[in-house]
Amino acid sequence: MPKNQKKPRIGLIMTEDAVSMDTPKLMGRQSAGHGFLKACLQNPDLRERITLVTPAGKPREAVQAVVKSLTAKEAAPAPVPCLDLNAPAQWAALDVLHMPAPLANLQLSQRSAWRLDHLVFSGVTHTISSAHVMQQLADYVRTPTRPSDALICTSQSVRTAVERIWRVEKAVLQRRFGRFERQPELPGLPIIPLGVHTQDFAFSPADRLAARTTLGFSPQDLVVLFVGRLSFHAKANPVALYRAAAEVAVRTGQRIRILECGWFANEATEKAFNEVALQHNVQVQRLDGRKPHALQRSLAAADVFCSLSDNIQETFGLTPIEAMAAGLPCILSDWDGYRETLQHGQHGFLIPTQMPGPSGLDRIEQRFASEQLNYDHYIGHMQAVTAVDVELTVQALQTLVTRPDLRQQMGAAGQAHVRQQYDWAGVVAQYDALWTEQTARLAQHRGPRLPRLHAAQLSPADLFRHYPTQRLTPDTPLYRAPATGVYTGKAAASAAQSARQWSMWSFLAQHWIASPDQVAKGTQALHPELPQSIQHWGQTQQLSRPQSLRLAAWLIKIGQASTQPPAPESALRSVHLIAGDKQHAAQGDIQRLLADKRCVLNLTPGTLQEQLHQIQQCGGHAVLLAPQETLHDFWLIERLHDAFARFALVKLSQHALAIRHDLLAAFTAMNACEDRSWPADSARLHAALLQVAQNGQLPTGDWAVALSPAPLHTQAQEVPRG
């Protein structure tokens, strides 16, 4: 590492499925993930720089429980910080984001969308035979990966397969579009194996004797161990092992015991294993590999480890590493990653394997792709035609049965090999060195910037922009919508607040659509005639631009806002109060009305005629209130608009008149109030208004519900007590 280069901050994407050993379907990737996390926590330098990146809630609690179990022996374990996997903005605090699987296209696109250009990714391969993973690997040719990213291959076999996928994908694209002007920027493919905590497999002679005694093995028994899922189609077919054990027992006279540490997925699979064992006259003893200490007890009791994998799911093979760590000589199939961990003749024996070429597989890949074969049947068909050399298996096992010195020699050599190459402490150090190298490579990267857009993840506003009639923008004008013709007893702000609490919106987060209180406040700030741009309105409500646009759209959706001004003939105009002097205007009932932006208090000095003329020029309605009038109806403006939809003149009470805009225009044009004052001439004024309305065929009516004519000076009498 260059001098003064800061060590990178590492985010580890962790889920319970990736690290928990307490699962009814324990897989190798979970054992590997558990061991990897344990190694990271045991590395003091690395532990200070790692952050867990998990989904919030119960998934995080499950991962933290695993961390707690791994640090239980520490006196005062320091907490490991956490970030939200579903909040990419939080990843800005990291330099490297590592996932316990191949690089996910979702995270790759999120890095681009959130402009996290400083962040490098690393992932690790497990099985690559599933349709999902193969498509995921092929997609790297067109997704926003970079050379500073890394897809860690656990074996050269995996790396070769990945390179073949990329080569074919590039060839397909070039066949369609011609030669690339610039080669795709693919991630690096470093090879880092999986590891084991070798100290967990250091057994003393006393440990071995105790394990053999517990399991019922005599000193004369030769115990051959297999560890892993007991699946003939998805792990290792037992035919070669069972047949070899039976043949060697006959040739040597040695009592050979087969021990299987694993688990069956179902009774049908267990029945199939038992059928083969019965055919070859071998006795098999089994332990549930999902239970604690079963693996250690099995490894301590065994003399030879045998795993004849014949499955395309296998990529590395962790159980042979565990067996060598326990000092056992191994008989392995010469297959994928197995051949890279064991040196033939030194740590045990590699048994040759055979498989038909493409012409012998009858386009099985197309049958799998078209779902004529499901995944289990696909890999099952492949293992059925993948052969492990039975005779060479017999020879290898016979050699180890008859040569106890060779068993000891090979076991010791394998144990030293694993401690040197595959202990998690050293493997995690390789990870850390890779992460440092990645960040340095990114600093030197001069390639094109990552694209922010991805065809499969376009914003709905872009992908479906041609769907709506109109698109809301920050400059779009916004009005308070006209009230409906049905009186609901609620002002617009209160109605919108209530609507936000309907159950149909309960799934919406408050950052998406504002809280009920914010909705009420925002609705109240709108005016029915005076437009505000959505951006300006949002700023007054302390909303971000996206929040303003979303809230505006939602208010329009529920009918409380509009982008269109009221129609010229609409009765839904501002209501101007002529309320007398300033002292009257300070009353609480008037102030309640003024909280509604559609209501305007007219305190302009001048005669009644001048005031009405000014209101008429504004295009609003007029309400004349005598000083002794008291308002009791909080929803007066709503109800006035309902009344104006029917009447041009409404006699609210003896001391209050409501004049619709069209009658007001006709009245002021005739100068019919030139010699009148309010409230002294209220009766004469009402009669004049009625005459103008009758001449213009405008309807009039009385409404004695909205106001109560209780004089202001009337004091409530005390109720006698006692």
Image (spheres, rainbow, N blue to C red):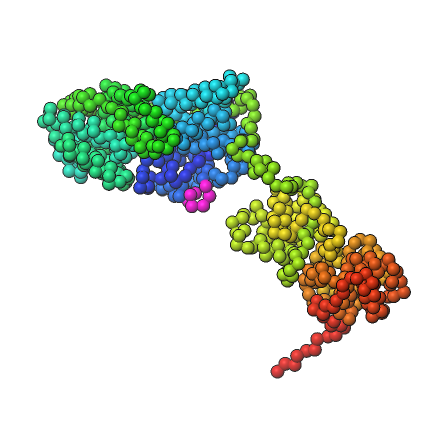
Towards the viewer: 267 or 256: 267
Q: Does the image show residue 398?
A: yes
Q: Which residue of the protein is positioned furthest toward the bottom in this rendering?
A: 722
How many marks are shown on the rendered structure? 0
Residue 570, quarter of the rendered image: bottom right
Residue 101, quarter of the rendered image: top left
User: What residue is shown at x 37% (from left), y 24% (from top)?
Assistant: 158
Where does the image place residue 307, in percent across and percent down from the top left?
A: 25, 28
Quadrant of the rendering where the C terminus is positioned: bottom right
User: What residue is shown at x 43% (from left), y 21% (from top)?
Assistant: 168
**Residues in magenta, as a range:** 55-61
Residue 119 higher or lower than 689, as above or below: above
Towards the viewer: 183 or 297: 183
Residue 191 higher or lower than 571, as above or below: above
Q: Does the image show residue 303?
A: no
Residue 483, quarter of the rendered image: bottom right
Where does the image place residue 545, in percent across and percent down from the top left?
A: 64, 42
Towards the viewer: 682 or 290: 682
Where does the image place residue 251, in percent across and percent down from the top left?
A: 11, 24
Whether residue 59 appears in magenta in the rendering, the answer is yes
Towards the viewer: 720 or 250: 250
